[in-house]
Amino acid sequence: MVRLSFIVFSIQLLCSWSSCSKQDRPVENDLKLQKTALSGEWSFTLGERSTLSQSGFPPGDSGYYTDGAVPVLKLGNQYIAFWARYRNYRTVASSPLLQDHLNHLNPLTPVFGGNQPNNGTSNGFNDGGMWFIGVRQLNDGRLAGFFHAETHWYPRNTQGWYAYKSIGVAYSSDSGRSWGAPYQILKHELNKPDTPRWSGLGDGAVIYNHLNNKYYCYYTPATGVTAICMAASADPNGYVGSWKKWYNNAFSEPGLGGKQTAIAPLSMNPGSNPSVHWNTYLNKFVMIWHGWDGKLYISASANAETWETPKLLLEDGPKTWYPAIVGASSVEGGQVIQLYYAYNFRPDGRRTLASRTITFQLL
């Protein structure tokens, strides 16, 4: 039954990557879809839950994934994915689906990130690790890797695992096998406190908006407003100094140290760790995130700035977190996409990685 469901999903997904489903529809159905697309109303159905193997993957961190969305992009005829838990592993497969990437590490060792030992020292930016939250190929062939960064207080055995969070960018000239120096691009208006506590901003996602040629970062502050906020950059490479935070209905505050305002109406269901993609069936951006109540929520936007009222997507146990969407890639999908998420959290932080299909319908 599981194998049959996967075959059906694969056929649906292949059609969503091409124009075959559109060409096979009668003309009157095309007209109906055009009308409903203009109205903007849509619904979704969820497939049955399946789970992915956690045996030995990622090495040394088996059972902890996902720790956020998994960036997946196509390079040539292969798909590259980055799996993060304070350090990042790179996998290569002939499919974008995460189950096809398990145990396909290339190289076998982490390509980016890492943290100080418990008795290490803090550098005030990324000594606690870096998690990729968006990877894009630039016009010059390089990869831009946007990441969540943490700095800790040491020694951890007396200070705990609290973190001050921020967001940065690094660049790769060899398809993500190695990365250059990390740069901080988004920082909270409040500096790292002397007393250990959750602080800063992070747990986000970065996408490139092809409609206006801008990057958008969706993130959550750890203090103050703990709902999803956003920042934007018109620089083609997302360089330091080009980012502006959304504040009082405009991108008016600097990325490093500026203030922010939560996105309305997403603040109705505050949370973090969004996964965002452009949906070619809805002709909208779609965001899925976990609320602080342990449920997954979904919203859509025609321009990546003005978002619709959230809908409840999924409640799978007391804690359903870390959604990751994959369609043609992690930032583009069609009528049928694959949802990955973590549930069944154990006391040591390990969790089960689950998968379901999401099928959209225009109303």
Image (spheres, rainbow, N blue to C red):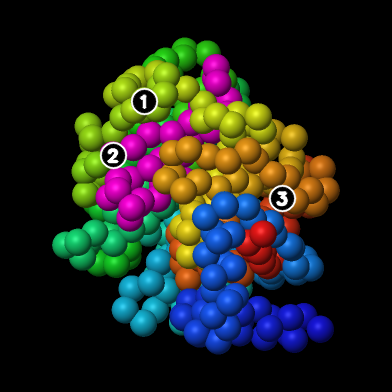
Q: Is residue 284 left or right of residue 253?
A: right
Which mark sits nearer the N-terminus, 1 or 3?
1
Looking at the image, can residue 87 be seen? no
Residue 167 x %, y %: 39, 37
> Which of label 1 and label 3 is nearer to you?
1
Magenta segment includes 207 = yes
Judged from this view, the residue extending furthest toward the left is 140
Q: Nearer the viewer, residue 260 or 324?
A: 260
| Image mark for residue 233 | 2
Is residue 252 something one can see in this rendering?
yes
Residue under label 1, please give it.
250
For the residue carrying disc 1, how many other residues have a C-alpha within 10 Å: few (<14), some (14-19), or many (20+)?
few
Q: Amino acid at mark 2?
A: Ser
Q: Are dots 1 and 3 in contact, CB under 8 Å?
A: no
Q: For residue 313, which numbered disc appears in the image?
A: 3
Q: Which residues are magenta?
A: 205-233
> For residue 290, which quarter of the picture?
top right
Could you give the CA–CA distance between mark 3 and mark 2, rounded to whole angstroms? 29 Å
Is 304 colored magenta in this rendering? no
The mark lying in front, picked from 1 and 2, is: 1
Question: For residue 254, what is the image quadrant?
Answer: top left
**Closer-to-camera residue (263/354):** 263
Provide the secondary structure element on which disc 1 rests: loop
- In this view, 156 is above or below 206: above
Residue at x 37%, y 56% (from the top left corner): 135
| Residue type (three-letter) at the residue carrying disc 3 | Leu
Image quadrant where one finds the C terminus:
bottom right
Badge number at residue 139: none
Of the two numbered discs 3 and 2 on the same chain, state the one appearing first in sequence: 2
Which residue is farthest top? 194
Residue 93 place in picture, x, y as percent: 47, 78
In the rendered image, residue 230, in percent from the top left (x then y), is placed at: 43, 34
